[in-house]
Image: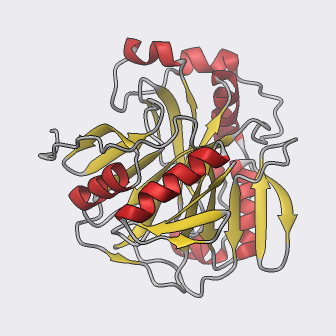
Amino acid sequence: MVQRIDGKQGKFVLDAATQVGSVILKVKDLERQIAFYENVVGLVVLEKSTQNAKFGGKGSNNVIFELEKTAEKLQTAKSTGLFHTAFLLPSREAFATKFFEILRNKETIDSPIEQSSRFPHFERYIPIARLDSASDHGYSEAFYIYDIEGNGIEIYADRHREDWDKYPGGSNPLNFKELAPLADFETDGKLPAETIIGHVHLRIANIEESVDFYINKLGFEKQMIIDTAFFISVGGYHHHLAGNVWSGEGLQKAAENESGLKEVRFKLPTTESYETAKNYIKQQIQIQDLGDEFVVEDPSGNRMVFEIA
């Protein structure tokens, strides 16, 4: 059912080439999370220290994902923050390859507390245990897993934009018969160099406040708004950001020392588009202007950073 919000587009719209640049998470167990994102998700560590790690696709120097060891405890489920980070693969072949690799991957997931509390009947547990769901959304094909601290992950590939309307929307079963012949069963499981963050899905406190903030204050464009979720983008994409209240409305922001989302970073394509966005947005809401980037916080306490690509 469509939400009772007019969802009218504000006068300002972000540059159509704006993209999600990277996502930064706060984690409690850095080493085990690094192992998970390497061995299960398939990212490659580009930089590493005792306090953080930066990741990209295999063969790329482009940092798209970061972990910071700043959490002292795990985030509660009833709080705002990250629902999932969505890694966009460059082709349907790459998606099929990674999907079947997850199903066949025998790497042990190293999470002792979870092993003993959730999987005591196994001597070890492996990546297929993390598979939450898989769906054909019409515009994309996707599967969903979650890391050892409960952060959601989507891995997906888009169909060609001209084909988006040729397939039913919603969440339909993947076509295994079509995907299997496309997969490389000799893969090492690593995500391709061209992998980017396609979108980020948030847990929010209120739909109406969030829609107003992202559309009228920041300049995103409405794609779909329903009673419990919204999907927005720039340049006509199906969504660069989504938010939901599926865990409840009026949730509080996670504490600073809890795990989960630190920030989502957006890249604007030019200095002109960056300055135009900053000058508009700072007239609408309070921003933190750091010169080469500026920071805003949405009504649910989610931190968004804008920078020049």
Rendered image quadrant of residue 224: top left
**In the figure, is residue 292 to the left or right of 121?**
right
> Residue at 36% of width from left, 32% of height from top?
171
Position of 240 with respect to 125 (left or right) is left
Using the image as rendered, state which of residue 64 and residue 171 is in the foreground.
64
Q: Residue at x 68, y 63 (%)?
A: 292
Percent from the top left, x then y, of residue 118?
52, 69
Seen at 54% across and 86% down, the residue is: 257
Quadrant in the picture for the N terminus: top left
Of residue 273 and residue 38, the one placed in the foreground of this image is 273
Could you say where residue 53 lies in the image, as x and y percent from the top left? Answer: 78, 67
Residue drawn at x 68%, y 77% is: 29
The answer to whether 231 is drawn above or below residue 74 in the figure is above
Q: Residue furthest left?
A: 4
Residue 110 visible? The answer is no
- Occupied quadrant, residue 88: top right
Q: Position of residue 68 (x, y in %)?
A: 69, 74
Q: In the figure, is residue 241 to the left or right of 230? A: right
- In this picture the colour scheme is secondary structure
Q: Judge by depth and name the residue closer to the eye, 152 or 236.
A: 236
**Along the line of sight, the residue nearer the viewer: 124 or 174:** 174
- Dividing the picture into quadrants, the one containing residue 65 is bottom right
Q: Is residue 104 above or below residue 164?
A: below
Number of labels in the image equals 0
